[in-house]
Image (spheres, rainbow, N blue to C red):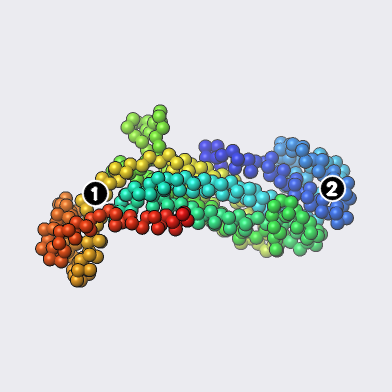
């Protein structure tokens, strides 16, 4: 997590100040319920809340931790310095994982809300540009090779639909991660009443973990980070499309190049797809954090802390990086420069070949076998590939083709409208309009 690829709102979730504030709230809410149950004095619970508006001394907590070698104990010691003697009732029957795991899930829940907004903003940009280019005809490619006509709007609509699926995945992952554990050592509630857990969960916007075995099961976290990896992969797919379209030989679309921007220290003419290249790299990082989260699932018995070091890194890094990537891609789509004329020119570069399937199918409708239809169309198509011929002209000169179809029928097969006639239907499916 470095400033270059970070946004303040997401970074703030993972700041020490935020973490210790969440720890405090967990302890204070737990104390409230324990006081209600008569486990601790009511005045003790009230005294804990006197630290509500106190700014915790991060340096002091770090100093204590260097001695005790335990972060939660260091925090509780500092809290006792603020609260006074009544602090002896804090953390009754609780274990460190109750605080750490519940806090981590609160942070992930808050992070997921920012990511949800980020995906939604990207979808809005994709939708706007999709409608703008709904009827902008371009060539569809398979294997990187010209296939058949499509529209640039359909490309963007497909990206929108993909991100809509990701939004649903994120919502499911958010719900799965939003659990709380205040169950004590090995998760048996031996020294703390389950109602304390329920109270803290309600106050922190979480649900209770059905069985926590001292730690919240890490399959939940594995799913959460795997979902972030899938979203990152979708970002990379869109970014890769832009990168390909910006190649000099293609140049059907390109990233916005701002006044005063420079593309190369050596070559003044350069306009490079640096934003989408950056997004490709960031996606690799987010995906790379999904595997350690999956490996965290297999902890020893009721708990160990092999997951701890992993999560201290991937929690902030994955969410901060993905948040930045979503915002960057939204900006790319919002300002993407599109060249419809170049799209048409590129599509016509091989002089009508994109209509080959329609010609083949029309021949079969005229009684020619599929095998012979394929042979006739491919024979003429290869002259276009190899000799730069015009496809329609070659078909008109082929006696076997003209024996099955007249000139008007052939010419009608080269109508681009044939390929775009169902665009509105697809848009209705995607956008529900």
What secondary structure is marked by label 2? helix
Q: Position of residue 179 (x, y in %)?
A: 67, 57
Q: Position of residue 41 (x, y in %)?
A: 89, 50
Residue 247 quadrant: top left
In the image: residue 411, left or right of residue 290: left
State the separation of the CA atoms marked 1 and 2: 77 Å
Number of marks present in the image shown: 2
Q: Residue at x 34, y 47 (%)?
A: 136
Q: 195 or 293: which is nearer to us?
A: 195
Q: Position of residue 399 (x, y in %)?
A: 10, 63
Circle number at residue 193: none
In the image: residue 347, left or right of residue 202: left
Circle number at residue 45: 2
Q: Earlier in the sequence, mark 1 or mark 2?
A: 2
Furthest-top residue in this view:
260
Q: Residue at x 59, y 38 (%)?
A: 8
Q: Is residue 401 above or below residue 3?
A: below
Q: Residue at x 27, y 53 (%)?
A: 416
Q: Position of residue 291 (x, y in %)?
A: 53, 56
Circle number at residue 348: 1
């Amino acid at each position: 997590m470095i400033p270059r690829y970070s946004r303040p709102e997401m970074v703030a979730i993972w700041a020490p100040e935020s973490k210790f504030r969440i720890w405090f709230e967990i302890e204070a809410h737990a104390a409230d319920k324990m006081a209600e149950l008569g486990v601790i004095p009511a005045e003790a619970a009230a005294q804990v809340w006197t630290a509500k508006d106190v700014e915790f001394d991060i340096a002091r907590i770090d100093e204590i931790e260097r001695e005790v070698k335990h972060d939660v104990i260091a925090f509780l010691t500092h809290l006792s310095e603020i609260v006074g003697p009544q602090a002896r009732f804090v953390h009754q029957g609780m274990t460190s994982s109750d605080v750490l795991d519940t806090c981590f899930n609160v942070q992930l829940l808050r992070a997921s809300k920012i990511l949800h907004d980020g995906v939604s903003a990207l979808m809005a940009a994709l939708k706007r540009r999709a409608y703008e280019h709904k009827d902008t005809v371009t060539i569809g490619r398979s294997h990187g090779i010209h296939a058949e006509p499509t529209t640039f709007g359909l490309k963007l609509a497909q990206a929108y639909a993909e991100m809509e699926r990701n939004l649903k995945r994120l919502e499911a992952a958010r719900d799965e991660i939003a659990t709380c554990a205040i169950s004590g050592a090995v998760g048996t509630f031996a020294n703390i009443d389950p109602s304390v857990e329920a109270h803290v969960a309600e106050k922190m916007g979480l649900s209770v973990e059905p069985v926590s075995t001292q730690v919240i099961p890490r399959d939940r976290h594995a799913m959460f980070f795997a979902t972030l990896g899938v979203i990152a992969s979708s970002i990379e797919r869109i970014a890769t499309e832009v990168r390909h379209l910006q190649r000099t030989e293609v140049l059907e679309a390109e990233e916005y190049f701002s006044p005063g921007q420079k593309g190369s220290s050596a070559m003044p003419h350069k306009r490079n797809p640096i934003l989408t290249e950056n997004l490709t790299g960031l996606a690799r990082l987010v995906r790379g954090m999904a595997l350690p989260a999956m490996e965290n699932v297999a902890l020893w018995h009721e708990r160990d802390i092999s997951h701890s070091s992993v999560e201290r890194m991937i929690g902030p890094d994955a969410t901060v990086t993905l948040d930045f990537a979503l915002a960057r891609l939204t900006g790319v789509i919002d300002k993407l420069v599109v060249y419809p004329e170049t799209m048409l020119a590129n599509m016509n570069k091989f002089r009508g070949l994109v209509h080959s399937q329609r010609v083949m199918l029309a021949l079969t409708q005229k009684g020619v076998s599929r095998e012979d239809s394929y042979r006739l169309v491919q024979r003429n198509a290869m002259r276009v590939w190899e000799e730069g011929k015009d496809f329609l002209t070659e078909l008109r000169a082929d006696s076997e083709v003209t024996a099955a179809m007249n000139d008007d029928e052939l010419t009608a097969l080269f109508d681009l409208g044939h390929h775009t006639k169902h665009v509105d239907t697809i848009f209705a499916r995607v956008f529900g309009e």
